[in-house]
Amino acid sequence: FELFRQHYHHTPADLLLRARLQTAKAKLLTSKAKVATIAFAVGFESLSGFHDNFQRLTGLTPTAYRKLGHSQTFTLTLPEAFDLAYLRRALSRDPHSLSERLTGDTYEAAVRINGQPEMITLELAPDKIEVLTTAPDSIIAHCIVCGLLGLDQDCPAFCRVVTKLGLQRLIADRPGLRMSQTHSLYEGILWSIIGQQINFPFACLLKRRLVELAGESMGNTLYAPPLPVRVAAL
């Protein structure tokens, strides 16, 4: 059990749950089968268990997720104890960013979806996040936003482990804290390279210079992130 956790960072039961949900998501988007049929086909013993786990890790009901394939908008339900204040700080850590900005309750980000420059707009509220994308469908936008919100991070399980180890101070006053992730793995790699061993303001400045040099203007003062080939050509 402990070896499994060390190598996969999940318990066997949690990894199996996520595999079942991943298969269910694919079936919801590619078939017309009823939600109940899909739930039982991927291994859930009850429809309520399927709905609860699906919404907990995606912010959507299975029916709402199915609509992502032909919609540019969706609304995510936030879990209990979600730290919206931390999310605001994460989304606005560089107030001069060329690729994203937070104005009041509105967050705008220029992203790459299937290689194309697109916009994602979030309207923040304490219990929900309304999302709009310029992409033809919302499937990848949903994945990006889930990463920004840290929805698939199991905070209750983390808190239980921390408490068991006697390290409650790590979660004091912030049991619902989730780590906000970059829009893509490639952007995460770029940021790790740019930001290592320098102070944060200068790292942000270097990132803005890179985006301005190799990114793609969206015509609204924001730039889509640079493609690898553009960075390699600098």
Image (tube, helix red, strand yellow):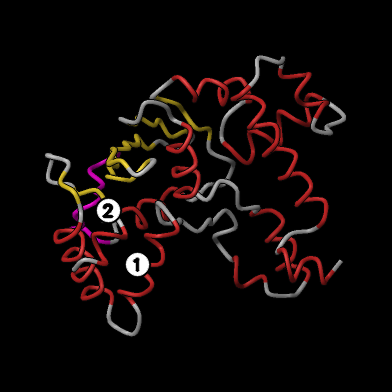
Badge 1: residue crowd in 10 Å (few <14, some 14–19, many ≥20): some
Disc on res. 62: none
- Left or right: residue 4 versus residue 119 is right
Quadrant, the C terminus: bottom left
- Give me the residue at 70% from left, 64% from top: 9
Q: Quadrant of residue 191?
A: bottom left
Q: Earlier in the sequence, mark 2 or mark 1?
A: 1
- Give me the residue at 45% from left, 26% from top: 74
**Which residue is nearer to you in this view: 41 or 54?**
41
- Left or right: residue 192 versus residue 67 is left
Q: Are marks 2 and 1 in contact (CB under 8 Å)?
A: yes
**Which residue is nearer to you in this view: 159 or 142?**
142
Q: Amino acid at mark 1?
A: Leu
Residue 103 belongs to the span the image colors magenta: yes
Q: Amino acid at mark 2?
A: Pro
Residue 59 at what x, y percent from top left? Answer: 56, 35
Above or below for 181 versus 34:
below
Disc on res. 225: 2
Above or below for 55 versus 227:
above
In space, the residues marked 2 and 1 are separated at their CA atoms by 10 Å
Residue 112 at what x, y percent from top left? Answer: 33, 45
Badge 2: residue crowd in 10 Å (few <14, some 14–19, many ≥20): many
Q: Please tell me whether mark 2 sits on a helix, a strand or a loop.
A: loop
**Which residue is nearer to you in this view: 155 or 144?**
144
Residue 125 belongs to the span the image colors magenta: no
Residue 117 at what x, y percent from top left? Answer: 27, 41
- Left or right: residue 8 versus residue 66 is right
Quadrant, the N terminus: bottom right
Extent of the magenta region = 94-105
